[in-house]
Amino acid sequence: MSQVYEKLMNAYRCYQEQVDFQPRIGLVLGSGLGTFAREVEVKATLPYSRIEGFPVSTAPGHAGQFVFGYLEDVPIVLMQGRIHFYEGYDITDVVLPERLMGLMGARVLFLTNAAGGFGDGFHPGMLMMITDHISCFVPNPLVGQNIGELGTRFPDMSNVYDLELQEIIRQTAAREKIELKEGIYAQLTGPSFETPAEIRMLKSLGASACGMSTVVEAIAANHMNMRICGISCITNMAAGFSRQKQTQEEVQETADRVGEVFCRLVRESILAIDRELR
Ligand code: HPA
């Protein structure tokens, strides 16, 4: 057994020993969705510190636990606090939580994040559904011995963000009268923000937003055949697209301001997705 798989299995055993709840959907809470747990009838929590070998998040504003419960009648697991590569963890540790949610039974992985925007017509505070991603600037979490129990050596990546889920989110946004942009998200390692030249490069590659998470998580979940969707909260204009400097304070401030609308879109989308897929 590979070390990565062994660690995952240990984490899975910790979950099984401590939590009697099987989620259908996994939701990674990015900045702006910190209060999402209020929407959920909580049945159990599992702090990351109580999972053997689990990386413990050090990012500001991230609590560091799984929350299990019902969103109306949908059994869901929330990640309050994700693991970022810039925290210094091995890339396989960064995606361990998503793999674990897959093992718990989540068939859908709903990814959210805060991102710097540079798409045409973008402004801080808007929401962008991720239609595709660029992963070339971060390590691939599947490098190393393939975990055959999870998926194939060379996974197809032509539809990472499930087309049916995209359509449900699109229709949900329209029904809720929430403006929703669409675009390609590029992940960089961080923790430094990008230079204007880097952002011009990303734009010339077709991206509309960038951040320091999400893509590696989507790669690992796609490897396991989970159905994936994602929404970015554009918290700031990226370097060169704003006279302001990029700061964590602005990211948090915008995320907090948009939080209520973001929560509503995610909540209604999840309910619609579960209705559709059941
Ligand atoms: N760059 C990278 N990551 C981010 C940004 C940004 O401008 N905003 C929020 N996360």
Image (cartoon, rainbow, N blue to C red):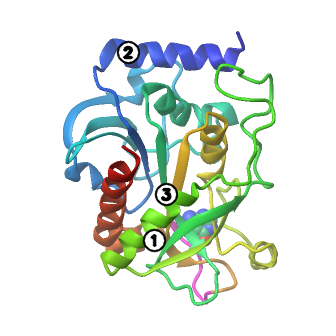
What's drawn in magenta, residue-wise? 242-248
Q: Earlier in the sequence, mark 1 or mark 2?
A: 2
Which residue does the numbered mark 2 point to in the structure image?
16
Going by the image, does 162 lie left or right of 133? left
Q: Quadrant of the C terminus?
A: top left
What SS does tag 3 mark? Answer: helix
| Position of residue 43 measured from the top left corner of the image (x, y, whole percent) | 20, 32
Please say if the residues under marks 2 and 3 sit with CB atoms less than 8 Å apart: no
- Principal secondary structure, stretch drawn in magenta: loop
Q: Which residue is mark 1?
A: 170
Of the residues under marks 2 and 3, which one precedes in the sequence? 2
Where residue 35 sits, quadrant-wise, is: bottom left
Q: Is residue 48 above or below residue 57?
A: above
Task: Tell me: 242 left or right of 171.
Answer: right
The 10 Å Cα crowd at callout 1, few under 14, some 14 to 19, many 20 or more, is many
Which residue position is annotated with label 3? 165
